Amino acid sequence: MFDCRIPTVLGLAGCLWSGVLCAETIQLKDGASVTGRILADKKDQVVVDLGFTVVSVPRAEILKIGRAPEPGLEGKPSRLAVVSENKGGLYVSAATPPPEKAVRELVQRLGESVVQVRTPAGLGSGFFLTEDGYLVTNFHVIEGETRISLEVYHQKDGQLDRHSYKDIRIIAMNKFVDLALLKVEDKDLPKFQRVLLGDNDALAVGERVFAIGSPLGLERTVTEGILSTKTREVAGSLYLQTTAQINPGNSGGPLFNLRGEVVGVTNMKLTFGEGIGFAIPVDELKYFLNHRDAFAYDNDNPNNAFRYLEPPSRLKTLEP
């Protein structure tokens, strides 16, 4: 068994496309939002076409409605799902499961959210959780390093524009589950393409999944397979096992289902077999993100992966 970080090598660029379809967005009072085409705007409710179903949203639950389409996408039909943000605001999950789509179509939409993570010791993969630059990778990809850079592809005028970001801050890390939270802090940042996080309880053995990452430095490589098992025990922890090819350089990259949701974070494979890769379940990632303060990185002490509280002083007792 070994991790999937590799020594730095020259990466080869590919061409993956990403796009967001035009849609009206209804912001709800509970923090969730509904994105789709509005069919009817009535006094007591708004009827929305999600593409795979039609829902009625009570007017009393609506905070605001935005109808601004993405530039260049006016007039195209929208097929997005209901999404809800977690209380910490660091990731988004689908409250209503999105429809399944072909891998080719999903890669065009999701490829921009996957990045290559570089350090002086090697490279791995990662993916954006938020539009303002929070991203996830494996702990072992950045272990012992503070000089971190990202290679990101932005879609511009129908073309993919490669850009390097070099001001990367470590926010939190947990070596025991092999996860790290980073933040891009370069100036004049664009909005990054974020992912949706799925639900491990909704996964089924035999379900098709695919990974995007930088195996052997080959950026934006897509591999497809099935979920072999949801509960493979390795060194006391449970992992997703998949036949999607996972190789050195895939570490920290996303494992997607056919709904376009991240269901795992790829991190290792068997050295003596093929088609036996592993990923950290997305529920472990959510727990790490929800409790990130407990794993906060102390930037004043790069040799220490965690910030510890000062020990309590001994209480002085008064002599009678």
Image (cartoon, rainbow, N blue to C red):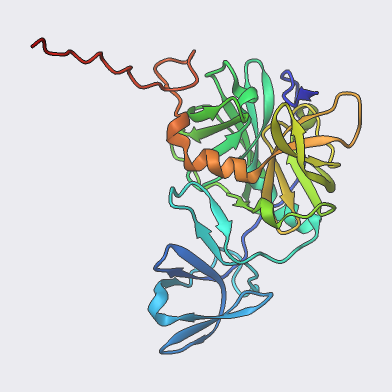
Residue 21 in view (yes/no): yes
Q: With respect to residue 90, does 219 lie above or below?
A: above
User: In the orientation shown, which residue stands out farthest toward the right?
Assistant: 273
Q: Position of residue 317 (x, y in %)?
A: 16, 13
Asked which quadrant contains residue 20, the reply is: bottom right
Q: Locate the N terminus by quadrant.
A: top right
Give residue 11's position: percent from left, percent from top: 75, 28
Residue 57 as seen in the image, left or right of residue 123: left
At 49% from the left and 69% from the top, the residue drawn is: 68
Residue at the extreme bottom:
43
Q: Residue furthest front?
A: 320
Q: Residue furthest left?
A: 320
Return the x and y of residue 303 as percentages of the image width and height: 49, 13
The quadrant in which the C terminus is found is top left
Q: Nearer the viewer, residue 229 or 101?
A: 229
Residue 224 in the image, given as x and y percentages of width and height? 84, 46
In the rendered structure, the answer to whether residue 226 lies left or right of residue 292 reads right
Q: Considering only vertical position in the picture, is 117 above or below 254? A: above
Of the pair 20 and 29, the residue shown nearer to us = 29
Residue at 62% x, 31% y is 177
Q: Is residue 133 at all visible to an observer of this figure?
A: no
When the figure is inspected, residue 74 is found, relative to residue 18, above or below; the finding is below
Quadrant hosting residue 122 = top right
Q: How many marks?
A: 0
Which residue is located at x 56 percent, y 17 percent?
Answer: 145
What is the quadrant of residue 178 in the picture? top right
